[in-house]
Image: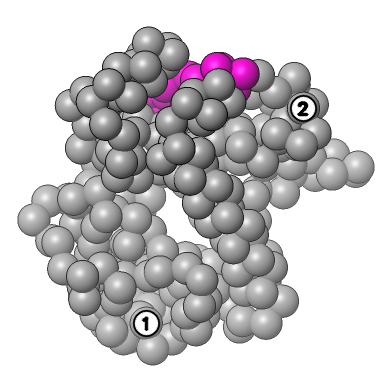
Amino acid sequence: MKDNKVVDISSIRTTCQNCGLYQLCLPMGLEEGDLDKLDKAIKRQHKVEKGEHLYKMRDAFKTVYALRSGSIKTYSTIENGQEQVTGFHLPGELLGLNSISTKFHTESAIALETSSVCEVPFDRLEELSKEIPSMQHHLLHVMSEEIQSDHCQLMMIAKMPAEARLARFLLSLSYHFSQRGFSATEFNLSMSRNDIANLLGLAVETVSRLFSHFQDNGLMTVERKHVLIHDLDGLMAVTTKCASQPLADDSSSA
């Protein structure tokens, strides 16, 4: 378990040539010469301010984004104008790949805090994937993970009780932070409780009540958006792990 530092998402910075997240992003497994090709294709230091859209639903799909720092929420707008949160994205994750088949974005992406992204034109990415087999393999792997994540999300909302949904959400964040070298047990939430409730298919009052319940049971301490998990095993016992998606216990056994 990596508990050496508390995560501050906005402090994570990455570049391809000197990248702490290279195993979680596009450069995974690339040789030095291949990495140079990718470097030339990437447009860096695109800053996205809090509340600013990276792209909007129905925008033409032209670019794949790699999140370097900060956090981004994706959401869709249904016919009655209501917003449905589809995910929260952290540094090292790719955005936009689910729009390849439609040629337009099927959801919107908005920064939850000041964020930074790398941009890779998709037509250039296709060319590089033909030249660099390891990149093609990695892209297929990432897309497969997205499908599995969507499947887990549907199962969670359909089958899990409320407390299991929130526990699983927190453990998923714990795992992601641990993978990036930050504390698995202490972090700040960049997303609101309204957004968490929306993603999990719960009422915001239920989410607030469950945070208090977990705190009363000694599983964690919650102060505004700061979360300190005292008992990862106890939190794990509350939920059911989706077979295709790792959680905090997987990082501790690595």
Disc 1 target residue? 236
* Residue at 48% over, 45% down: 137
Amino acid type indicated by mark 2: Lys
Q: Position of residue 166 (x, y in %)?
A: 50, 70
Residue 76 visible (yes or no): yes
Q: Which residue is mark 2?
A: 103
Left or right: residue 209 compared with residue 6: right
Please name the residue shown 64% across and 23% down the image: 55
CA–CA distance in space, label 2 to label 1: 39 Å
Residue at 16% x, 68% y is: 1
Badge 1 density bin: few <14, some 14–19, many ≥20, Cα 10 Å? some
Q: Is 123 rendered above or below residue 231? A: above
Element under label 1? helix
Nearer mark to the viewer, of 2 and 1: 2
The relative height of residue 130 versus residue 191 in the rendered view (above or below) is above
Question: Who is closer to the viewer here, 144 or 50?
Answer: 144
Q: Nearer the viewer, residue 18 or 152?
A: 18
User: Which residues, given as a range, are shown in magenta?
Assistant: 114-124
Residue 247 % position (x, y): 38, 70
| Residue 20 shown left or right of residue 197 in the figure | left
Image quarter (top left, top right, bottom left or bottom right) of the C terminus: bottom left
Residue type, numbered disc 1: Met
Residue at (19% x, 57% y) in the render: 183
Q: Is residue 151 above or below residue 21?
A: below
- The x and y percentages for residue 3 are 13, 61
* Residue 115 lies within the magenta run: yes
Q: Quadrant of residue 105?
A: top right
Badge 2: residue crowd in 10 Å (few <14, some 14–19, many ≥20) = few
* 3 magenta-colored: no
- Which callout, 2 or 1, points at the residue further toward the start of the chain? 2
